[in-house]
Amino acid sequence: APPSPDDESVGTLRRDRHCYVCKTAYRRVDADYHLMCPDCAQENRVRRHARCDLTGRTAVVTGGRVKIGFHTVLKLLRDGAQVIVTTRFPRDAARRYAAVPDSADWADRLYVHGLDLLDLPATLDFVALVGRRFGGLDILVNNAAQTLWRPPAYHREVREAEATPLAGPAARIAVGAAPTRP
């Protein structure tokens, strides 16, 4: 039978697949959570837009420039947290955050810190900076990872853009060393 309009399924597999979360075998494929069984997909759908008040909380998200790190930062900011993002490309990150339609609502609580986590002395300086300037940390999301080696040409455009000063709404986002808390 074809799926009903409120069914989140996009089809049925010929063979069982095991759920990424609970490892149960399944065949119905969810439109958003194709690697999860229908029960886990529904649970994730319910929790996807969950909210909590993080006002007064400070979070660090490593690798917050793109993908899941970027969306994690947005969720934390929209829930009221002050967020410190680390990335190797801080100006690019500031431009991306400034382009989000509701950025005016939270840009004053976003701090983007340029950091290559492979540089241990710089990482230790960053940890000290967070303690000194923000009085500690409530939330830590370790998202940064360098799982694939890329040739220098791969990041050429974004590296060149890092030399361009920020303008417009992006210029209002704190980049570099995070400023002292008011």
Image: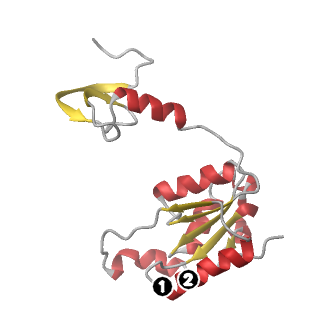
Q: Name the residue furthest right.
A: 182
38 displayed left or right of 117: left
Q: Label 1 vs label 2: CA separation?
A: 6 Å
**Point 57% across, 67% down: residue:** 93
Count of numbered tags: 2
* Nearest the eye: 83 or 121: 121
Looking at the picture, how far across and down is residue 4, in whole percent? 39, 14
**Point 35% across, 40% down: residue:** 21
Residue of label 1:
120
Answer above or below: position of 2 versus 48: above
Look at the numbered discs 1 and 2 and tell me whether their residues touch, using CB distance below 8 Å: yes
Looking at the picture, how far across and down is residue 173, in whole percent? 70, 68
- For residue 112, the mark is none
Q: Is residue 135 visible?
A: yes
Amino acid found under the numbered disc labelled 1: Leu
Label 1 crowd (10 A; few <14 / some 14-19 / many >=20): few
Residue of label 2:
124
Q: What element carries label 2?
A: helix
Answer above or below: position of 4 versus 71: above
Answer above or below: position of 70 versus 53: below
Q: In which quarter of the image is residue 112?
A: bottom right
Looking at the picture, how far across and down is residue 1, in whole percent? 27, 11
Amino acid found under the numbered disc labelled 2: Leu
**Point 47% across, 77% down: residue:** 117
